Image (cartoon, rainbow, N blue to C red):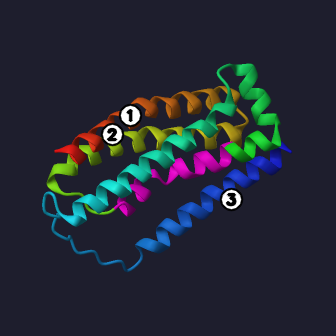
Amino acid sequence: MRRRVASSVALLAAGALAAASLSACGAVTHAAPAPPAHSELERIWMDNARRFVQGLATDLGLVECGGPTLASARAAMADENDVYTLLVAYGLFGDCRQELTNVGRPSVRERRALSILADACGKLERASALFQRAMTRHEPKALLEATAASLAAGPVLSRARAELATLATS
């Protein structure tokens, strides 16, 4: 069971790396201008950002099955359903910054919200790396660290949500 899970995690990580490498091949990007303040494009970015925050907040709930103690982390690593749930959540966290770019181009007014979201993504991507280490090396302590790093993104997501709400009313 442990080898199968570790192999699955390793394959997921390798596949993500390959996909990222291939997507960068031959890509030419042109910087689009930021949308004007109070425009339809600005509103669309805010809507997309709110959905992005909500999705991450939902995914944070998935990592709680890792538990708050070393014993609960060991139990989660031994439970196939918990491992699958964690694999889904941390797989999504590992792509956080890329998914954030898919939200679109923010207006100048929205750049603070983008910065807050980028901070949350940094925490979630670190958590994803810790989860990968936990599973490939069978280290319950690393799973605890991954859980803590993930949950540390919660207050940051709350700040992003508040910033987006302020923008929507101004």
Q: Mark 1 points at which residue?
A: 158
Q: Left or right: where does residue 164 sit relative to residue 132?
A: left
Going by the numbered disc 2, the residue's amino acid type is: Ala
Is residue 104 highlighted in magenta?
Answer: no
Q: Which of marks 3 and 1 is in front?
A: 1
How far from the left and from the top, in percent, is residue 152? Answer: 46, 29
How far from the left and from the top, in percent, is residue 70? Answer: 70, 20
Which labelled disc corresponds to residue 160?
2
Quadrant for the C terminus in the image: top left
- Residue at x 55% of width, y 38% of height: 60
Q: Left or right: where does residue 127 sit relative to residue 51?
A: right
Magenta span of residues: 86-103
- The span from disc 3 to disc 1 (Cα, nearest Å) is 33 Å
Q: Left or right: where does residue 60 sit relative to residue 35?
A: right
| Quadrant position of residue 156 | top left
How far from the left and from the top, in percent, is residue 105? Answer: 26, 62
Q: Are the two marked residues, 3 and 1, in contact with CB atoms closer than 8 angstroms?
A: no
